[in-house]
């Protein structure tokens, strides 16, 4: 589960909230599940990593809050790990003051909710509707007092007109009171009126949108015919849903969702939720589930295929493999060509420059990705089509714009000559071993992005991690390449390992995206110090006629080492934690540095 920030607060919540209106007392509504039947849903949600639970005082007239509080204790979820949201406003009894947003009702309501939930504070206390009969100053001051008392941590609001919400926000800002951080509004593929005013207001003010009824009270699931409202208990008895949905145009929307879902072999609910999660401002839709597969369908919506033409995870991985194969094919001949056309005394500078230019492209690419993602509203498939353009241009430049030097080649019939490795000197294989050792200590850069996401970096800005790394990589590579033409390679390699150890330690200790960027910058400095130098050492130790073979074997060994290192790092991340993953990297880099320092230096290394 990747947690997201609730608006501009520091509070992190799961991108789905379990709505608890379905759990409470069947005497309130016949489709409500009693406590015993509700417990499996809480267990499945907690197991999946959902930490955000939404209820209200009016749901089952308070029994929903009781069931929620008991369920969290039953499954042993520590109070500090749960984010509990409830609401106030509705009619709770025949008493004329037991409703609305007066100071009296708010103060009594919060105490009653705390008692039913069995807790001493509420994470998110929401006004269920706007109260036109109570001055907004009275309501906002009372809510502010709850925050000051420690009974409530954050304030939220629910369905109302945008002008009403703006009025409340203005009163809070004018008086310096705690302000609303979330809006729980009605929003789904059938009802999109909120896109006119409320959602733009929330996006502008940095307020989290946590929509209720993301599946239109089950209507978008596609199990309700045009003539009949549906065959489920809720479909037959939910009068509120009959007032909201089931118009002819509504059924056309459901038909479209059904067609998209059928083409991908997934339930309607997964498509409807995936769409909602991709909309601007949406933080965590509130899902209600009366069957366990409803909850599983909702969780499945958190992951969706991204690559062009990919409909399954298998094809996504296949596309990745094909991309890496292309990189492997072009890497060895490119480096061999550069070694052939560069005088040996200047190879360090040449490979340093090559790494710098590569890195410039590597950070321009993510910047373009951010711009394209914004321009195409996070349509990743469309953006990926653009990625084929620079690849085609690069091939065209190499094929038509670069003239090869005259070098003695093997006869065409012997291009694939498996015994060629025997002609490579021992010094070359020392370099291959060092390169593999360095790669083992430096697993995939994807873990840098994962670290940023884990610490709250939004997905749209995740490419900035690679931008920072590549920018530092580019700045360091060329000077380091010049240095390697004049200094001891061992000294530069040891310095590079020391920088990598420092980067891993910073990333292990990071508690904010800022420290992730610092660690990433150090990671880039390590790459700049070592990668061009290793390429220079390959070129210096391999015979001129075997440069392509030499770079191919070097890249193969480094690729295998990267695969092994990333698999180990992934296992540590999954079973121990992100910090342990980077600490392990620091330990391996330290061991590699010790081994390199103890080895007797030759003319090469």
Image: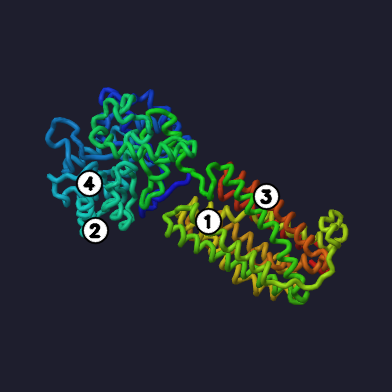
Q: Along the polypeptide, which appears first: circle 1 or circle 3?
A: 1
For residue 2, above or below residue 91: below
Give the CA separation, mark 4 to mark 2: 19 Å
Q: Position of residue 48 (x, y in %)?
A: 47, 37
Q: Quadrant of residue 206?
A: bottom left
The front one of 336 and 260 is: 260
Report the label total. Answer: 4
Q: Quadrant of residue 226?
A: top left
Q: Which residue is mark 3?
A: 563
Q: Which residue is mark 2?
A: 173
The front one of 542 and 166 is: 542
Which tag is nearer the camera, tag 1 or tag 4? 1
Q: Along the polypeptide, which appears first: circle 1 or circle 4?
A: 4
- Whether residue 430 is visible, yes or no, is yes
Q: Position of residue 514 (x, y in %)?
A: 48, 60
Q: Which residue is mark 1?
A: 385
For residue 354, above or below residue 465: below
- Whether residue 45 is visible, yes or no, is no
Say which residue appears at 79% left-offset and 65% top-offset: 547
- Label 3 near label 2: C-beta < 8 Å? no
- For residue 170, the mark is none
Q: Secondary structure at mark 4?
A: loop
Q: Along the polypeptide, which appears first: circle 1 or circle 2?
A: 2
Which tag is nearer the camera, tag 1 or tag 2? 1
- Colour logic: rainbow
């Amino acid at each position: 589960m990747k947690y997201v920030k609730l608006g501009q607060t520091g509070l992190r919540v799961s991108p789905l909230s379990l709505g608890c209106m379905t759990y409470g007392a069947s005497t309130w509504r016949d489709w409500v599940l009693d406590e015993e039947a509700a417990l499996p849903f809480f267990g499945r949600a907690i197991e999946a990593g959902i930490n955000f639970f939404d209820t209200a005082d009016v749901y089952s007239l308070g029994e929903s809050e009781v069931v929620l509080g008991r369920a969290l204790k039953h499954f042993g979820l520590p109070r500090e790990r749960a984010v509990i949201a409830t609401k106030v406003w509705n009619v709770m009894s025949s008493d004329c003051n037991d409703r609305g947003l007066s100071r009296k009702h708010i103060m009594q309501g919060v105490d009653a909710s705390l008692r039913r939930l069995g807790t001493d504070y509420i994470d998110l206390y929401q006004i269920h509707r706007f109260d036109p009969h109570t001055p907004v100053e009275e309501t906002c001051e009372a809510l502010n007092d709850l925050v000051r008392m420690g009974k409530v941590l954050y304030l939220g609001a629910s369905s109302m007109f945008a002008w009403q919400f703006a009025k409340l926000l203005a009163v809070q800002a004018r008086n310096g009171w705690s302000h609303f951080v979330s809006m729980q509004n009605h929003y789904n593929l059938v009802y999109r009126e909120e896109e006119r005013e409320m959602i733009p207001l929330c996006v502008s003010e940095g307020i989290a949108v946590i929509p209720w009824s993301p599946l239109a009270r089950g209507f978008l699931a596609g199990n309700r015919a045009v003539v009949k409202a549906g065959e489920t208990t809720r479909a037959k008895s939910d009068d509120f849903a009959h007032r909201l949905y089931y118009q002819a145009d509504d059924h056309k929307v459901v038909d479209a969702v059904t067609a998209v879902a059928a083409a991908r072999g997934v339930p309607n609910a997964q498509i409807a939720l995936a769409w909602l999660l991709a909309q601007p401002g949406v933080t965590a839709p509130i899902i209600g589930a009366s069957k366990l597969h409803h909850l599983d369908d909702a969780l499945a919506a958190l992951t969706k295929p991204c690559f062009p033409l990919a409909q399954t995870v298998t094809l996504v991985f296949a596309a990745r493999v094909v991309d890496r194969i292309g990189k492997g094919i072009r890497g060895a001949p490119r480096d061999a060509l550069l070694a052939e056309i560069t005088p040996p005394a200047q190879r360090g500078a040449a490979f340093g420059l090559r790494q710098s230019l590569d890195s410039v492209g590597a950070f321009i690419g993510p910047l373009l990705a951010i711009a394209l993602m914004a321009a195409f509203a996070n349509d990743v498939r469309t953006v990926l089509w653009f990625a084929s353009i620079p690849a085609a241009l690069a091939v065209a430049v190499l094929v038509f714009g670069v003239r090869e030097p005259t070098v003695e080649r093997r006869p065409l019939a012997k291009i694939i000559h498996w015994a060629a490795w025997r002609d490579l000197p021992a010094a070359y294989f020392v370099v291959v071993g060092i390169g593999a050792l360095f790669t083992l200590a430096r697993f995939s850069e994807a873990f840098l992005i994962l670290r940023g996401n884990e610490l709250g970096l939004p997905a749209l800005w995740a490419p900035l991690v690679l931008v920072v790394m590549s920018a530092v990589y580019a700045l360091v590579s060329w000077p380091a390449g010049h240095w390697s033409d004049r200094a001891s390679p061992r000294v530069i390699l040891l310095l590079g390992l020391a920088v990598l150890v420092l980067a891993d330690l910073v990333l292990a200790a990071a508690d904010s995206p800022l420290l992730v960027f610092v660690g990433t910058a150090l990671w880039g400095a390590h790459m700049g110090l070592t990668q061009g130098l290793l390429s220079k050492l390959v070129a210096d130790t391999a015979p001129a006629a075997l440069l392509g073979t030499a770079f191919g074997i070097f890249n193969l060994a480094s690729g295998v080492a990267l695969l092994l290192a990333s698999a180990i790092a992934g296992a540590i991340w999954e079973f121990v934690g992100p910090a342990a993953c980077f600490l392990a990297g620091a330990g391996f880099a330290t061991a590699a540095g010790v081994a390199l320092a103890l080895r007797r230096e030759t003319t090469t290394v």
